Image (spheres, coloured by chain):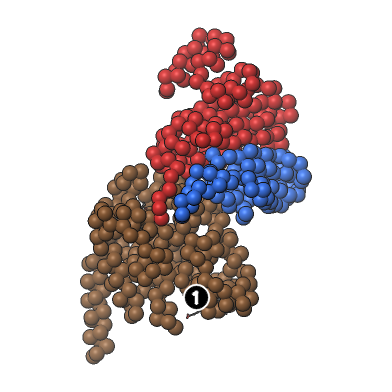
Chain colours: A red, B blue, C brown
């Protein structure tokens, strides 16, 4: 467990209000901007990517959100952020209750080792996120062949 | 722009089905050089959407952060027999589309 | 009697050849065996393998009339007639006596049979047709012949394979016979087999021919890259096919 996650869960265990929790999390300002002042909470979102990628040109990624996907309670959108890519907002996916299941799989480019963040916006206006570190041994570059 | 779509041919009404699409596109980042050293202009598929019998069930904004020949997989509820139609467009204004039929029973 | 003597010579040659193999047939491993689990799974996924985009495009081209004669490849060749064919290349073209790889064979039919321009190496169309044809041999063991006129090309290919080159003064054998299984930067050196080509390489972010892969190796050791389709590449390709004899074709491969 990374130290900051550890801190976050330690703070959570003390049952401090959400705002304090949010402050303990090292979230990119861009992600904050997306939430536009609304609290951004850790949880509900699961982000799966390999811990180590041999080539940053194509890294498999899976985002799942714990949601019943009903008209009353569903995921409206999922946003993917990179810490080191020239374009930090890698993708936005817009879903509706017609999805039935809140899960996206894709392949992304990552310019070096970094933390990837996925944020979900729910139909009640709340924002949830998950982040995962990844080591990229060879960043996106080309040989001369 | 060629593409491949994978959905079940048949499903039960209400079943959550897996939908996959793979599109042939370089997703040029704008940071690569060609054989003679010139920077290749950025050109990525920036929008991809899927309509199920005319109703949008999925949409994505993509960027150079998505791998060349993009692969996207998501889910949708099989509601009625008909078509899933994908459309996409890149920075140069090129558009592509591909459709696949599904039979829904029950 | 004479026949018998010839057979004995051939047998002896066969034995000698078998002894020359740096990697015994039982030890042969495809390049995919040296990949991480993600790329191996991607190669085996008939849908998500990006190389299948080229295979599909190749199938379309195969059926599309083209050239001055306005003929489709499929017009002369039955679909099933191409099963196993790719596994026999490079091969001597009977009419010209020249050694052809699959790309050269495709271009020969284009120029001689349908009156079309040859396709450029690494063009989307040549990669697509080559990938489509190789895919028709999926699982077929590599079985290129080095008999007859092919023999001299095989010898030249073997010499080329063992030639030290470039600023690092290395031969192909230094890496692919002596060091396979070991790490080199972020890659594991494989036995250097041709059975997955054309292949989709993540570093290229696209499909590439076997010759493009050879050029990548040459560039890696800071050696001269030869022009596409040059005789030395063709000879090397025949030697590589002989080394890989028995390995099943797995085009389109997915590589780092």
Residue B103: image x %, image y %? 73, 50
Q: Nearer the viewer, residue B15 or B87?
A: B87
Q: Nearer the viewer, residue C49 or C120?
A: C120
Residue C146: image x %, image y %? 33, 74
Residue C194: image x %, image y %? 39, 61
Quadrant of image for the N terminus of chain C: bottom left
Q: Residue at x 41, y 55 (%)?
A: A145
Mark 1 residue element: helix
Against A86, is C1 above or below?
below
Q: Is residue C93 left or right of residue A41?
A: left
Q: Is residue C53 left or right of residue A2?
A: right
Q: Is residue A79 left or right of residue B83?
A: left
Q: Residue at x 58, y 77 (%)?
A: C114
On the image, numbered disc 1 is attached to which residue? C108
Q: Is residue B20 visible to the viewer in this orientation of the structure?
A: no
Q: Nearer the viewer, residue C5 or B21?
A: B21
Q: How many marks?
A: 1
Which quadrant of the view contains residue A87? top right
Q: Is residue A124 visible to the viewer in this orientation of the structure?
A: yes
Against C216, is C66 above or below?
below
Against C185, is A43 above or below?
above
Q: Nearer the viewer, residue C164 or B8?
A: C164
Residue C118: image x %, image y %? 52, 71
């Amino acid at each position: 467990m990374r130290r900051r996650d550890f801190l976050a869960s330690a703070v959570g265990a003390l049952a401090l209000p959400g705002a304090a929790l949010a402050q303990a999390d090292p979230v990119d300002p861009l992600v904050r901007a997306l939430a536009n002042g609304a609290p951004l909470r850790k949880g509900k979102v699961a982000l799966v990517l390999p811990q180590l990628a041999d080539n940053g040109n194509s890294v498999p990624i899976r985002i799942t959100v714990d949601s019943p996907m009903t008209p009353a309670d569903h995921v409206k959108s999922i946003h993917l952020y990179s810490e080191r890519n020239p374009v930090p907002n890698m993708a936005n996916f817009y879903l509706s209750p017609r999805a039935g299941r809140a899960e996206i799989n894709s392949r992304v480019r990552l310019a070096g080792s970094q933390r990837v963040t996925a944020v979900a916006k729910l139909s009640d206006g709340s924002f949830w996120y998950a982040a995962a570190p990844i080591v990229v041994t060879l960043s996106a570059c080309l040989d001369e062949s | 722009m060629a593409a491949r779509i994978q959905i079940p041919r048949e499903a039960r009404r209400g079943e959550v089905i897996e939908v996959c699409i793979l599109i042939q596109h370089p997703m040029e980042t704008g940071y690569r050089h060609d054989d003679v050293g010139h920077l290749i202009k950025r050109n990525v598929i920036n929008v991809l959407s899927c309509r199920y019998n005319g109703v949008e069930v999925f949409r994505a904004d993509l960027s150079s952060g998505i791998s060349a020949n993009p692969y996207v997989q998501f889910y949708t509820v099989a509601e009625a027999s008909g078509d899933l139609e994908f459309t996409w467009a890149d920075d140069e204004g090129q558009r592509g589309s591909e459709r696949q039929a599904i039979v829904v029973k029950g | 009697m004479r026949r018998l003597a010839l057979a004995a010579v051939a047998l002896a040659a066969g034995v000698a050849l078998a002894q020359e193999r740096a990697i015994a047939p039982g030890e042969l491993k495809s390049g995919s065996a040296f990949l991480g689990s993600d790329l191996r799974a991607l190669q085996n996924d008939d849908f998500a393998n990006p190389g299948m985009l080229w295979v599909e495009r190749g199938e379309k081209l195969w059926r599309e009339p083209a050239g001055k004669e306005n003929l489709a490849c499929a017009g002369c060749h039955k679909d099933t007639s191409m099963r196993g064919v790719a596994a026999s290349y490079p091969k001597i073209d009977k009419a010209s006596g020249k050694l052809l790889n699959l790309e050269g064979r495709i271009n020969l039919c284009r120029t001689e049979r349908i009156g079309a321009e040859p396709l450029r190496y690494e063009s989307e169309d040549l990669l697509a047709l080559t990938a489509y044809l190789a895919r028709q041999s999926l699982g077929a063991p590599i079985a290129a012949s080095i008999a007859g006129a092919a023999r001299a090309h095989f010898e030249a290919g073997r010499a080329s394979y063992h030639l030290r080159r470039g600023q690092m003064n290395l031969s192909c054998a230094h890496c692919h016979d002596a060091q396979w299984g070991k790490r080199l930067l972020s890659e594991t050196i494989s036995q250097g087999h041709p059975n997955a080509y054309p292949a989709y390489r993540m570093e290229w972010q696209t499909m590439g021919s076997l010759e493009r892969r050879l050029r990548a190796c040459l560039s890696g050791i800071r050696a001269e890259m030869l022009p596409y389709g040059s005789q030395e590449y063709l000879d090397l390709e025949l030697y590589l096919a002989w080394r890989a004899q028995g390995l099943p074709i797995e085009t389109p491969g997915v590589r780092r």
